[in-house]
Image (spheres, rainbow, N blue to C red):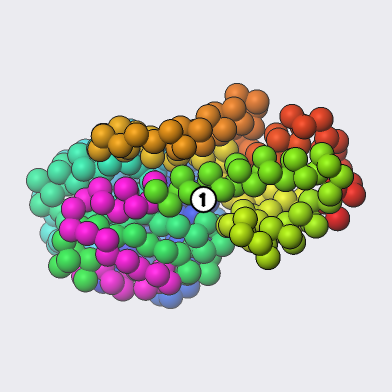
Amino acid sequence: MRDIAFIGVGTMAAEMVGRFVERGWRAHLLDPRPEATQPFQGLAGVAIYDTVGSLVQDADAVLLSLPTPAVLLEVSKQLAAAGPLERPVTVINTSTSGLSATRAAAAELTTSGMAFIDAPVSGGKAGARSGTLTIMLSGAQEAVDRCAPVFEVIGQHVIHVGPQPGQAQVMKVANNVLSLGALAATAEATALTSKAGIPLGVAIDVLNVSSGRNSATSVKIPNHVLTGAFDFGFPVEGALKDVSLFTDVAGELGLPAPLAQAVVDCWQLAVDQGYGTQDCTRITTMYERMAGLDTEGADSRHE
């Protein structure tokens, strides 16, 4: 297995592609946005495609990195219609696409003779670049074992959570509502400390040696807010999509989720306030503005 295809070459997928190319894999890429594949144009071992049908003919495994459940379903239909294929192909969905869409995509693809692995990832752009992603897998053990060389290139923690497509999605949305809920809660908590005149850096130092420590206090705010970069690499509208998928899945499984709904409301507010396309760490800016704090430039609250 040395031919890897990517449908969707966004922020995280581009980092993954780079790792495969560096290790001598042949990469087959498709993205409707020319700027997404442009950095790979002309590289040895890289081919750019215009159609799903032509791309899948050349691949052993196809990684999907797609923005919405609707796009996943559309691409799955195109893949299923591409047969007959000369060799077995495994489709690996790394997107966060929820339960029902993932199950439907799996059914579409397996009916056409392709194997399907549900494989959402966690770790952000930095994890994709360094090959330290956590990969949550669900699907047939045989397919998972066959694709082990793929996961070794991009993942540090590769965990098979169950045999059914969609189980990994449930795990991923559970992770994301905790992670993005922690970021929203930390933004709200530190707006309060900042309002009281405590520098943000000092508040983060205290939280990181106290019981309030979380992924926002330990990574996102020190590396992407205190630096003024706001470059975690995931937009606010993406955060809203992911936490909304949690409440969708909770509804499908008959689980009340009042806390998750509050997290959805926080990210919906950020979108409504005009931050949709901005980095998710900008939710700290939103809370500071609502607190009446000066958010322009570096000030003593960030020292």
Residue closer to the observer: 65 or 142: 142
From this view, report whether residue 247 is shown above or below residue 150: above
Q: Which residues are magenta?
A: 146-173
Instruction: Count up the numbered dots.
Output: 1
Does 150 lie within the magenta span? Answer: yes
Q: Which residue is mark 1?
A: 179
Residue closer to the observer: 241 or 145: 241
Q: Residue at x 43, y 72 (%)?
A: 156
On the rendered structure, is 212 left or right of 106? right
From this view, report whether residue 32 is shown above or below residue 7: above
Q: Based on the displayed image, in which of its 4 quarters is residue 70 positioned?
A: top left
Hey, which residue is sitting farthest right in the picture?
Answer: 300
CA neighbours of label 1 inside 10 A, class few (<14), some (14 to 19), many (20+): some
Residue 62 seen in the current view: no
Q: Residue at x 39, y 48 (%)?
A: 174
On the rendered structure, is 262 left or right of 230? left
Residue 22 seen in the current view: yes
Secondary structure under tag 1 reads helix
Q: Residue 109's spot in the image, x, y percent?
A: 17, 46
From this view, report whether residue 156 is shown above or below residue 104: below
Amino acid at dot 1: Ser
Q: Residue at x 25, y 38 (%)?
A: 253
Q: Residue 4's spot in the image, x, y percent?
A: 33, 63
Q: Residue 145's spot in the image, x, y percent?
A: 21, 71
Q: Residue at x 54, y 57 (%)?
A: 125
